[in-house]
Image: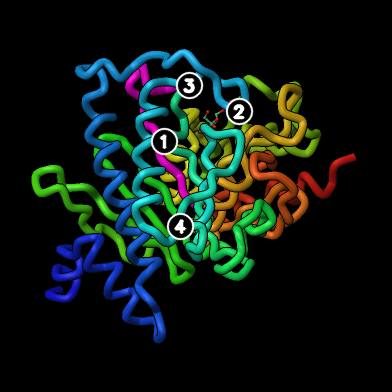
Amino acid sequence: MAQEKANHLLTLEEFIIRSQNRFDGATGELSQLLRDIGLAAKIVSREVNKAGITNLLGQQGSRNVHGESVKKLDVFADEQIMSALARSGIVSLMISEESNELIRLESSSGKYIVFFDPLDGSSNIDVNVSVGTIFSIYMRKSHREVRAEESDALQPGDKQAAAGYVLYGSSTMLVYTTGMGVSSFTLDPTIGEFMLTDDDIRIPDFHPQYSINEGYSSGWPEGVRSYIEYIKKVDPQTKRPYSLRYIGSMVSDLHRTLLLGGIFLYPPNVSNPEGKLRLMYECNPMGYIIEQAGGLALDGRGRILEIVPESIHQTAPAYMGSRKNVEKLMEFLRSEK
Ligand code: P6P
């Protein structure tokens, strides 16, 4: 009990240092990068939680690479994360949802490459629905002496050195993995520290809940449509019908799925024939976390983390969650006519 209580009082910084000490030869650079991201998250959290007062709500006027209107908080979050990564001195390339081109840093000898979605779900900002920051960290492939190129960044999700998200909800939480399980921290605003809340999150093997935008059902693959019809039929023995929860903010929908179980689906549809979610800074980091917690993250053919990327902003279909939920979906996708 004492140990459990002691763990609960660990700050993010203390936890990162303890985890680093488990790695012989760890240089502390990844730990430093995670701490820098944690600082940026605190600054973004402060503004997200008072946006209405400081007039950061509303449209900023421009549009991002995908033609989506950019909101002021998007810009603020983007700036905070970029400056935190630039200050670290160990990042050579940054790729943000808000920037069409990759951003090469002065410290281009830095060993890390970071993809991030600064404020995912931002269409929900003005109606006070939770939004999130998603990040995905890779070691560059090329030698540090040469200039980092896009080819350094185009690595499959299996090569991620770390991945995580910040959820700006009723409380601000940071969840991340470095490949040794999933840990979560809750921001205590009274002391400005992320406090450890769970050092090994495991996703339940099954839960009768699904998360999908049913409005696009006419454009879904046949296997998805059959699966959704199946889980809506009444059969108490197999806990059907499942309940539907869909917030429209990937970080919120997947955080709930991670903790309670179930399945999150973003299939291809008429407007997004390759899926809507971005592979490098939405599907891969969230998929890494779900897999590290014991779940599955598939694109309908295979593991999302095995997709070899061809461009930094490409999209992918996403089916993630509890093992048994995703395996049942795959039965329907494999039996598609
Ligand atoms: P739709 C937010 O814009 C986002 O990228 C994800 O956070 C979310 O899961 C998805 O799009 C919602 O998309 O088409 O259901 O509004």
Q: Which quadrant is home to the C terminus?
A: top right
Choose between 3 and 168: the one closer to the eye. Answer: 168
Q: Position of residue 312 (x, y in %)?
A: 65, 44
| Dot 3 or dot 4, earlier in sequence | 3
Name the amino acid, label 4.
Ser
Residue at mark 3? 70
| Dot 2 or dot 1, earlier in sequence | 2
Name the amino acid, label 1.
Asp
Q: Which of the 4 image quadrants contains residue 97?
A: top right
Find the distance from the CA under tag 2 to the CA under tag 1.
Answer: 14 Å
Q: What stretch of residues is rendered in magenta?
A: 123-136
Query: On screen, 294 above or below 150?
Result: below
On the rendered structure, is 196 left or right of 324?
A: left
Magenta includes 128?
yes
Query: On screen, 126 above or below 281?
Result: above
Give the label, 3 or 4, closer to the camera. 4
Secondary structure, mark 1, is: helix
Quadrant field for ligand 1: top right
Choose between 124 and 295: the one closer to the eye. Answer: 124
| Dot 4 or dot 2, earlier in sequence | 2
Residue at mark 2? 65
Residue at mark 4? 107
Label 2 lies in ligand 1 vicinity (Cβ under 8 Å)? no
Secondary structure, mark 4, is: loop
Q: Are marks 4 and 2 in contact (CB under 8 Å)?
A: no
Find the distance from the CA under tag 3 to the CA under tag 1.
Answer: 11 Å
Q: Which quadrant is home to the N terminus?
A: bottom left
Residue at mark 1? 78
